[in-house]
Image: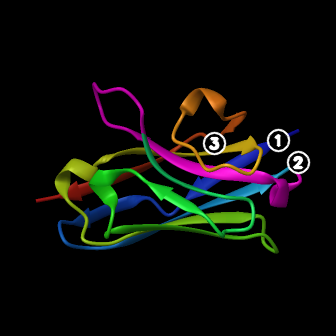
Amino acid sequence: QVQLVESGGGLVQAGGSLRLSCAASGVTFSSYTMGWFRQASGKEREFVAAVSWNGGRTYNTDSVKGRFTISRDNAKNTVYLQMNSLKPEDTAVYYCAGRRGSQPTGAAGTYDHWGQGTQVTVSS
């Protein structure tokens, strides 16, 4: 049974930082591309960042470039999202997702497994 469990969300002031973690089990983690998505209240889910199976390639959406960094530790079956210079518009539920294959992509429909989400709230 595949499980993705996010942690690290919370309340932070604008300009602050958070690091999200997503621990995977029940999969051969090193063969999966991993991604982060987010969904703000009343809005559609949107892509944030993705990382290839070995961490060699990453892909971020424009709104987080220079502020967010995705990384992974295959020895720990964990993917991270370091979020710096947070803005109120980053407030959302953040979801971890995994897909078989080597190509990091923002296409949510191509991801096979999803976590339950963790809330990030940025106050102004």
In the rendered image, residue 101, in percent from the top left (x then y), is placed at 77, 45
Q: CA distance from mark 2 to mark 3?
A: 13 Å
Residue 7 lies within the magenta run: no
| Residue position for label 3 | 115
In the rendered image, residue 4, in percent from the top left (x then y), is placed at 70, 48
In the rendered image, residue 12, in percent from the top left (x then y), is placed at 27, 66
Residue located 70% across and 51% down the image:
33
In the rendered image, residue 6, in percent from the top left (x then y), is placed at 59, 54
Residue 38 lies within the magenta run: yes
Q: Amino acid at mark 2?
A: Gly
Question: Is the N terminus in the top left, top right, bottom left or bottom right quadrant?
Answer: top right
Q: Residues within 10 Å of mark 1 (few under 14, many from 20)?
A: few
| Label 3 secondary element | loop
| Label 2 secondary element | loop
- The region drawn magenta spans 27-46
Q: Amino acid at mark 1?
A: Val
- Asked if disc 1 and disc 2 are in contact, CB closer than 8 Å, the reply is yes
Q: CA distance from mark 1 to mark 2?
A: 4 Å
| Residue position for label 1 | 2
| Label 1 secondary element | loop
For the image shown, how many numbered marks are present on the structure? Answer: 3
Residue located 61% across and 64% down the image:
57
Figure colour scheme: rainbow
- Disc marking residue 26: 2
